[in-house]
Amino acid sequence: ARAQQTSAVQYGASGGLTLPIGRIGDTNGSGFHLQGHATYKPSSTAFGLRGDIGFWTTPGKSITPVSGGPTTKFPGVNWLTINANAIYHFEGAKDATFVPYVIGGVGLYNGTRNVGTNIGINAGGGVTFRLAGLDAFTEARLHNVFADGFSPRLIPITFGVNIKR
């Protein structure tokens, strides 16, 4: 019976593609992100909490006007992120191969190139599954950062693994 019990705490790592959209997408290209996670989710409930800490990058673009003229090189932005999230798993059968979930929360986002440290929100969804004996997941979330004068929006598309403690 003890072997079948699962811990309520998991740790993990993830990474993937970071897509800037909106105004920041005009000057920055697609980058990557690396993150660490800690999740608390008792097996008796579909609700859980997850904390993320990450490094994201969105490289600058070079843009040449259609009418000709000099090319403008925009600087890239590196981000340090810390998020606190609520997560809800749509658990049908406890032994389901794929379990979809929704996730959302608040965070602090520190961006280089005069972006500074700002509060933001995020929401999205994903699916968990077993992969080579590990609990794996893939997800996409929209992050909206409330910066002075503009709100950078980023969509990280993530693949990760969790290890039960």
Image (cartoon, grey):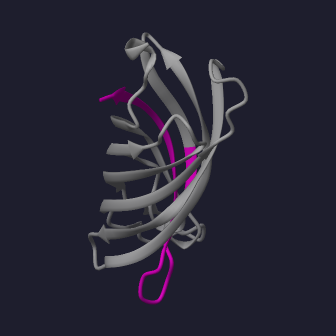
Quadrant, the N terminus: top left
Q: Position of residue 57 (x, y in %)?
A: 34, 54
Q: Is residue 64 visible?
A: no
Q: Which picture quadrant has residue 89?
A: top right
Above or below for 124 versus 134 = below
Q: Position of residue 78 (x, y in %)?
A: 29, 60
Left or right: residue 129 versus residue 112 is right
Identify which residue is drawn at 56% across, 37% down: 44
Q: Position of residue 55 (x, y in %)?
A: 29, 52
Identify which residue is drawn at 42% across, 32% down: 160
Identify which residue is drawn at 53% across, 63% down: 122
- Which of the pair 17/80 is nearer the observer? 80
Segment colored magenta: 140-165
Q: Position of residue 109 (x, y in %)?
A: 35, 68
Q: Main secondary structure of the magenta part?
A: strand
Identify which residue is drawn at 33% across, 61% down: 82
